[in-house]
């Protein structure tokens, strides 16, 4: 019998979890009669009763497995841990807040089975219920990163997707520390079909993403999948060299013709400010890449497990 693994990353989701499980089970019973299921809940160091909730589910349902982290490692780490521990022929990644509707799963499964795709991704075509300023920056980010990177990032793409074993194995083989899944999914390639749906607001609890966290995540995405900012700072440097060369020529000729009355120190100060600003900016860009390299070279584990369902049975 074929098996679908459902990976759910959870961080402080005590309210949403029971609702998620109920809905997922309903869909499973209704749409997937002859297919085996396995649920892997990854507790990303939750500070509320999420782990207790998961353990209760694991007690009454043998399909439920879990991984609990020693602290909060972030959703990227949680998804990676889930992927590493799955055995299913097909793997899906879902949020615990029901923003990724399980009811789409059958359609996704059929597309893989009948149309020969390796991966079915979902993207939301609306951003209803999101602050407008956040949507605006999200759009700008996708425009920018698609210009800068060779890899295509689909605007509104969610992490919710169903993948074949083959694709999952290739994702697991990418062991980088700075994980930006949206980029990794496109990087590994394979035939992907996109299903579109309207944004759904979370059932309970609240979003874990502050604006600042999203901003840092965006920088992560850019440094992980594009070296364009480095080229940018070289280009700016070059342009400044050309401009200063022309200015030097201008000043030498002017001095030869009109002599050298002492003046122009305010303009000098402005130029020093401008040039040192550009230098610091470029240094900052290099620093970003260097810091990512630093973290990568340290080779730290992406996550640390505190307990799993195997510990429960003891
Ligand atoms: N999540 C996680 N670790 C984190 C932050 C979030 O595992 O550090 C999980 C969270 O429990 C949820 C999913 O990632 O299942 C998406 O989070 P959220 O709903 O807050 O993000 P949004 O849907 O608003 O983008
Ligand atoms: Mg959500």
Image: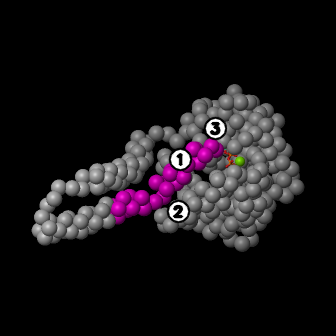
Report how far apart the C-alphas of labels 2 and 3 lie in the structure: 30 Å
Secondary structure under badge 2?
helix
Q: What predominant SS class does the magenta segment belong to?
A: helix
Q: Nearer the viewer, mark 2 or mark 3?
A: 2
Ligand 1 visible in quadrant: top right
Q: Is 253 in the magenta?
A: no
Q: Are marks 2 and 3 in contact (CB under 8 Å)?
A: no
Note whether residue 236 is visible. yes
Note whether residue 54 is visible. no
Task: Residue under label 3, please give it.
Answer: 44
- The local crowd at label 3, few if under 14, some if 14 to 19, many if 20 or more residues have their Cα within 10 Å, is many
| Residue at screen point 49% across, 48% down | 178
| x and y, in percent, of residue 278 in the image | 35, 54
Task: Residue under label 1, please give it.
Answer: 216
> Compared with residue 69, is residue 95 higher up or lower down, i.e. above or below?
below
User: Does 286 sit left or right of 194 as displayed?
Assistant: left
Label 3 CB sits under 8 Å from any ligand 1 atom: yes
User: Does 15 sit left or right of 225 as displayed?
Assistant: right
User: Does 296 sit left or right of 163 as displayed?
Assistant: left
């Amino acid at each position: 019998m074929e098996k679908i693994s459902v990976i759910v990353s959870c961080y402080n989701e005590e309210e949403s979890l029971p609702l998620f499980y109920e809905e997922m089970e309903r869909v499973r019973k209704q749409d997937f009669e002859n297919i085996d299921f396995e649920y892997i809940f990854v507790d990303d160091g939750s500070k509320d009763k999420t782990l207790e909730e998961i353990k209760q589910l694991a007690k009454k349902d043998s399909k439920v497995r879990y991984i609990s982290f020693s602290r909060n490692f972030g959703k990227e780490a949680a998804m990676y841990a889930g992927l590493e521990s799955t055995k299913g022929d097909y793997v899906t990644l879902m949020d615990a807040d029901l923003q990724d509707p399980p009811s789409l799963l059958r359609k996704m499964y059929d597309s893989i089975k009948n149309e020969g795709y390796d991966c079915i991704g979902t993207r939301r075509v609306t951003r209803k219920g999101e602050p407008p300023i956040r949507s605006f920056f999200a759009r700008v980010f996708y425009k920018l990163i698609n210009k800068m990177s060779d890899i295509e990032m689909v605007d509104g793409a969610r992490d919710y997707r169903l993948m074949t074993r083959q694709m999952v194995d290739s994702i697991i083989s990418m062991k980088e520390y700075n994980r930006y899944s949206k980029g990794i999914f496109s990087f590994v390639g394979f035939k992907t079909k996109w299903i579109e749906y309207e944004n759904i607001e979370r059932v309970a609890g609240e979003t874990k993403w502050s604006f600042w966290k999203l901003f840092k995540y965006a920088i992560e995405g850019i440094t992980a999948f594009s070296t364009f900012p480095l080229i940018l700072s070289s280009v700016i440097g070059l342009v400044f060299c050309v401009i200063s060369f022309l200015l030097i020529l201008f000043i030498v000729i002017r001095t030869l013709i009109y002599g050298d009355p002492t003046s122009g120190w305010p303009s000098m100060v402005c130029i020093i400010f401008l040039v040192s600003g550009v230098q610091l900016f470029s240094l900052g860009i290099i620093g970003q890449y260097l810091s990512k390299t630093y973290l990568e070279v340290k080779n730290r584990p992406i996550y640390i497990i505190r307990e799993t369902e195997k510990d429960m049975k003891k």
